[in-house]
Amino acid sequence: MQPTTLAAVRRTSFADMPCSVARSLEVVGEWWTPLIVRDALFGVRRFEEFQARLGIARNVLAQRLDQLVEEGVLVRVPYQERPVRHEYRLTDKGRDLWHVLTALRQWGDRWVAPDGPPVRLLHERCGRTVTAVPVCSHCGEELRPQELRPTRGPGFRPIGVGDEHIATG
Amino acid sequence: MQPTTLAAVRRTSFADMPCSVARSLEVVGEWWTPLIVRDALFGVRRFEEFQARLGIARNVLAQRLDQLVEEGVLVRVPYQERPVRHEYRLTDKGRDLWHVLTALRQWGDRWVAPDGPPVRLLHERCGRTVTAVPVCSHCGEELRPQELRPTRGPGFRPIGVGDEHIATG
């Protein structure tokens, strides 16, 4: 039977999918979550500051922050004793999302930024405004999607019809 | 006044945010959309095949596909005359999402794939199973987030408090 509500679809499908894209979306796919991670990568740590930047309802923000702590993307750390106040810091797992956010930002800069990129990245090592270019971990050549073929990894299980697209290699 | 429903939050905030991450999420941030793009990048084109792979309600899938056509990520092309049947093909804008999906998959492989990566990428150019490594477009060194500093681009407008994090450079 088809699930008939979006909530039911969300609950029944993502966690079981043997796919790292789907599982990642389970962690960071909620609408506001990537923007919270974006701001955390920019150095934002406190509830009030997230709230002011995002213009998000406080109950929604609190729920998303709790979820990110539970998933191990953020950690909640006291920064003041009386009264106790907490801030949110990225874990290694959270900081590792910068590549995802950078790729997403660059796509947006290219396709949905009519006034030009709102933010640019200065590479302190070479002193230039740069972009991230994906290269091959083995040969170092720039990766082009037409030269990449998906193959089955150790965690592979078929998702459905069409997995003949994924070779046994 | 605070918006009190998630729908209201979604409507009022994202399109106006001068941020390429937020604007990209406006296009591909709906829960199922990245998985539709993932399957399209794997070569899936037909409604029935998307439906079978994703296990998604048909009305939700139809709505997401329509939205992706409207945003210019997919194009709807007839593949049969009588009766007319259509398939969905990625545009250049859509294909350009592969870097985002690859970064998301690699994060998932690293942090949420207890049985190992479900899918690996074979780089036909060098014949190896590889990952995408983000390097600097200027100096070619591997990018490390602690060496990157956000600066204001031509499309910059302050989002809220905390934008002192974004230098004028």
Image (cartoon, coloured by chain):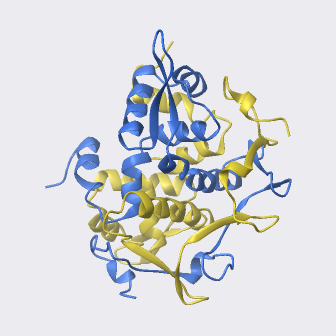
Chain colours: A yellow, B blue
Along the horizontal axis of the image, is A147 left or right of A98? right
- A148 or B114, nearer to the observer: A148
Along the horizontal axis of the image, is A29 left or right of A54? right
Residue A1 image position (x, y, % from top left): 51, 12
Query: Residue at 23% of width from left, 45% of height from top?
Result: B8
Residue B130 shows in the view: yes
Residue A49 image position (x, y, % from top left): 32, 71
Furthest residue in direction front, as rendered: B81
Residue A36 shows in the view: no
Dividing the image into 4 quarters, which one contains the N terminus of chain B?
bottom left
- A81 or A71, nearer to the observer: A71
Residue B96 image position (x, y, % from top left): 54, 53
- Asked which quadrant contains residue A123, the reply is bottom right
- Asked which quadrant contains residue B159, the reply is bottom left
Query: How many labels, in total?
Result: 0
Residue B161's place in the image compared with B113, above or below, is: below
Query: Residue at 58% of width from left, 83% of height from top?
Result: B147
Residue A57's place in the image compared with A138, above or below, is: above
Residue A23 image position (x, y, % from top left): 60, 43
Query: Residue at 44% of width from left, 46% of height from top?
Result: B28
Furthest residue in direction left, as rendered: B1
Along the horizontal axis of the image, is B22 left or right of A143? left
Along the horizontal axis of the image, is A152 left or right of A87? right
Dividing the image into 4 quarters, which one contains the C terminus of chain B?
bottom left
Residue B59's place in the image compared with B38, above or below, is: above
Residue A22's place in the image compared with B140, above or below, is: above
Furthest residue in direction top, as rendered: B82
